[in-house]
Image: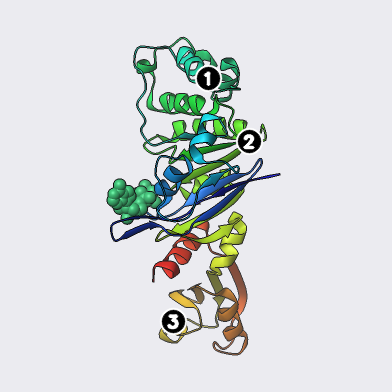
């Protein structure tokens, strides 16, 4: 069974923040929402949660209006930099949050999934930044939502806190829950997301598994050896797809937006006597940049 999350459009004056975006998060799936600053991620998330009204189209979460879906605990979110009641204890805050929903997780379970059981009696204003973020996570999951939304959950966390946060998120996702998260850290996407939705200029420009996104971008690196130093790299720069050339003695490295086209040109004799050819797909970072550059051009 899949959980459909449909979104429409939202403009701010002349700025078309989100244009006819439609997302689907399947049950048990972790989806990453990627995009440069201003791509429309937070506006999309705001509409999913009923915090921002679309000005065209209709938002439905699991077939429900966003406000109803939030109240029923079908969708829950951890937004950027939300404040927390200072004088309460960790366990009390999660308990209190759970009471707002019809079928919450037991408090101990939410604390356990967030890795906070040992800190249940700690005052919330005595937590480190990473612990406070995991508390926000516990507060979000205590409603036992069908879809959990995380907006840049590891922003401003140090490396250790990021690792601990994703451990908690993966423990939660392993219980079969669906997660949609926005991030700028592509290493987090490779490690934590089964599927990626790339936004640029308020639109979805690509969607698929990290491997499919790399294939869609089509780019990568073509490396080969030539006989004798290849003194002239200007001809190489003109090969189909090539966006960058570096020559180190007999070793030539071509950065290309289209590996197939570049290799075909080599095979057709564009460079004499090449050997030891290696083709590597682009990294997710490079693919992301290629796809968003194309969409923004
Ligand atoms: N309340 C607002 N008033 C005017 N313009 C807005 C408002 N909120 C967002 N925008 C504009 O809408 C566009 C999309 O913004 P949004 O915050 O959704 O992007 P984002 O992908 O979440 O960016 P970031 O990664 O920086 O959080 C941007 O051009 C932004 O300036």
Which image quadrant is residue 209 in? bottom right
Is 77 situated above or below 238? Answer: above
Mark 2 beta carbon near ligand 1 (under 8 Å): no
Determine whether label 2 and label 1 are within 8 Å by CB.
Answer: no
Q: Is the CB of mark 1 within 8 Å of ligand 1?
A: no
Residue at the top extreme, as displayed: 121
Labels 3, 1: front one? 1
Q: What residue would you read off at disc 2?
A: 177
Which x, y percent locates residue 124?
39, 17
Q: Residue at x 48, y 43 (%)?
A: 48
For marks 3 and 2, the one nearer the N-term is: 2
Mark found first going from the N terminus, 2 or 1: 1
Tag 3 near tag 1, CB within 8 Å: no
Image coordinates for residue 246, horizontal then vertical, percent: 44, 73
Point out residue 123 in the picture as x, y percentages from the top left corner.
39, 12
Give the CA separation, mark 2 to mark 1: 17 Å
Q: Which residue is mark 1?
A: 98
């Amino acid at each position: 069974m899949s959980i459909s999350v449909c979104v429409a459009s939202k403009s701010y004056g002349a700025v078309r923040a989100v244009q006819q975006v439609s997302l689907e998060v399947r049950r048990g799936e972790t989806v990453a929402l990627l995009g440069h600053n201003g791509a429309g991620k937070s506006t999309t998330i705001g509409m999913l949660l009923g915090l921002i009204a679309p000005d065209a189209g209709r938002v439905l979460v699991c077939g429900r209006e966003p406000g109803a879906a939030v109240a029923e605990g079908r969708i829950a979110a951890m937004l950027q930099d939300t404040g927390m009641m200072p004088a309460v204890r960790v366990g009390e805050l999660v308990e209190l949050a759970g009471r707002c929903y019809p079928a919450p997780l037991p408090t101990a379970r939410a604390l356990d999934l967030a890795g906070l059981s040992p800190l249940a009696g700690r005052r919330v204003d005595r937590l480190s930044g990473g612990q406070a973020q995991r508390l926000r996570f516990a507060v979000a999951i205590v409603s036992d939502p069908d879809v959990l939304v995380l907006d840049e959950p590891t922003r401003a966390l140090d490396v250790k806190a990021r690792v601990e946060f994703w451990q908690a998120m993966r423990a939660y996702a392993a219980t079969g829950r669906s997660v949609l998260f926005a991030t700028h850290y592509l290493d987090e996407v490779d490690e934590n997301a089964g599927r990626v939705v790339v936004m640029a200029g308020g639109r979805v420009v690509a969607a698929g598994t990290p491997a499919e996104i790399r294939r869609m971008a089509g780019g990568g690196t073509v490396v080969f050896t030539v006989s004798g130093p290849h003194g002239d790299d200007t001809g190489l720069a003109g090969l189909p797809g090539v966006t960058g050339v570096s020559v180190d003695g007999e070793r030539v490295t071509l950065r290309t937006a289209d590996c197939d086209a570049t290799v075909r040109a080599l095979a057709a004799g564009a460079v004499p006597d090449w050997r030891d050819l290696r083709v590597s797909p682009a990294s997710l970072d490079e693919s992301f940049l290629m796809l968003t550059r194309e969409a923004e051009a």
